[in-house]
Image (tube, coloured by chain):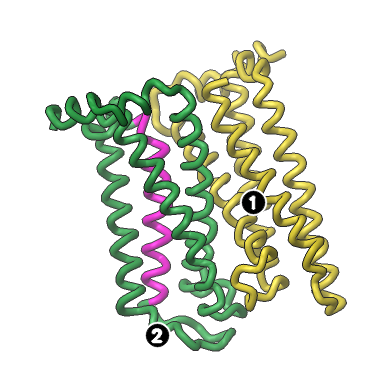
Chain colours: A yellow, B green
Amino acid sequence: MMAWLEATALATWTRESPSIWAYPAILTLHTVGLGIVVGASAVIDFRLLGFARRMSLPSLSPLFRFMLWAFLLNAATGFLLFMSEATTKSRQPVFYIKLTLIALALWNTNLIRLGIRRDGEIGAPLNAPRYRRLAVVSLALWTGAITAGRLMAYL
Amino acid sequence: MDAFVEWLRATPVSQTIVYKIWIWPLCETLHFVGLAMVIGIAGFFDLRLVGFFRQIAVDDVRELMPLAVTGFLINLVTGSIFFVGHPEQYVHNPAWWWKVAFLGLAGFNALMFQVLVGKSTVGLRPGTDTPSAAKAIGAVSLISWFAVLYFGRMLPFLGGAF
């Protein structure tokens, strides 16, 4: 199945085209996407940890929309990147670690998003210890995902 | 230039960076973490300057900036390590010089904000639009940082230096 994926026209083009619009562009978009996902998450996480405390959390919630679109960009570019070298990448344990960390990070981010929406609506003061934990976990998981992604070039 | 590259490559620091095989992957990882911090935090501040997220006061967003500076410093250090380890990959690479140019633009732009324009955003109440000069600074900053990211990512692909 991996060999089949790798042999498709799309995967072949990604991998073998000398054009900078193929592999290099896809890789660049993947980097842009991760900058936005992890960056936007970092704004919220650092706010939850007490930085720039005067920023109201509900006013930051449009950042989740940014994160969603950037994540979709990375899912698409990531799939293309995977396809282009499916036989090799599917045999790298660090790739599965990366996917697991991303899944956990998305879950955790969603908990933060739902919490801000719920607590913002009922006007409850945001429970600082719980949100601090979620923020630390968020930073750790996204940093882990970046690390696993980068180490795919080596392991 | 080649004499400088040869000299640098021969230094103990450079040799260490190349031979301790964990240094490069560690620094690359940190470099990506740093870029996420710069894009996210400085990018968010730039978006505010341009006029998004208007309900948040500019002053309040500005309090995040030390984190963006931290990200930048992480990347300055790791970037220097890359340069010292393999100067030959950068010195003749047009992508690297474009990256340096946009880093310069980002820095100059930030200086313009600190010295000239920043004052006009202090004390602005939430909901107020930012002055045009601040919007321009925000836009130039966003463009510069994404250009830095682009040329950084394209280092292996443009110029054939790798």
Q: Quarter holding the C terminus of chain B?
A: top left
Secondary structure found at label 1:
helix
Does B22 sit above or below residue B96? above
The lab-note entry on whether marks 2 and 1 share a chain reads no
Residue underneath mark 2? B120
Residue underneath mark 1? A69
| Quarter-of-image position of residue B139 | bottom left
Q: Amino acid at mark 1?
A: Trp
- Magenta highlight range: B134-157
How far apart are the alpha carbons under marks 2 and 1?
Answer: 33 Å
Q: How many marks?
A: 2
Camera-side residue: B126 or A146?
A: A146
Q: Amino acid at mark 2?
A: Ser
Chain under callout 2: B
Residue A142, position as x, y percentages in the image: 65, 45
Does B128 sit above or below residue B18? below
Residue A25, position as x, y percentages in the image: 46, 36
What residue is shown at x 54% (from left), y 39% (from top)? Answer: A30
Q: Is residue B102 left or right of residue B6?
A: right
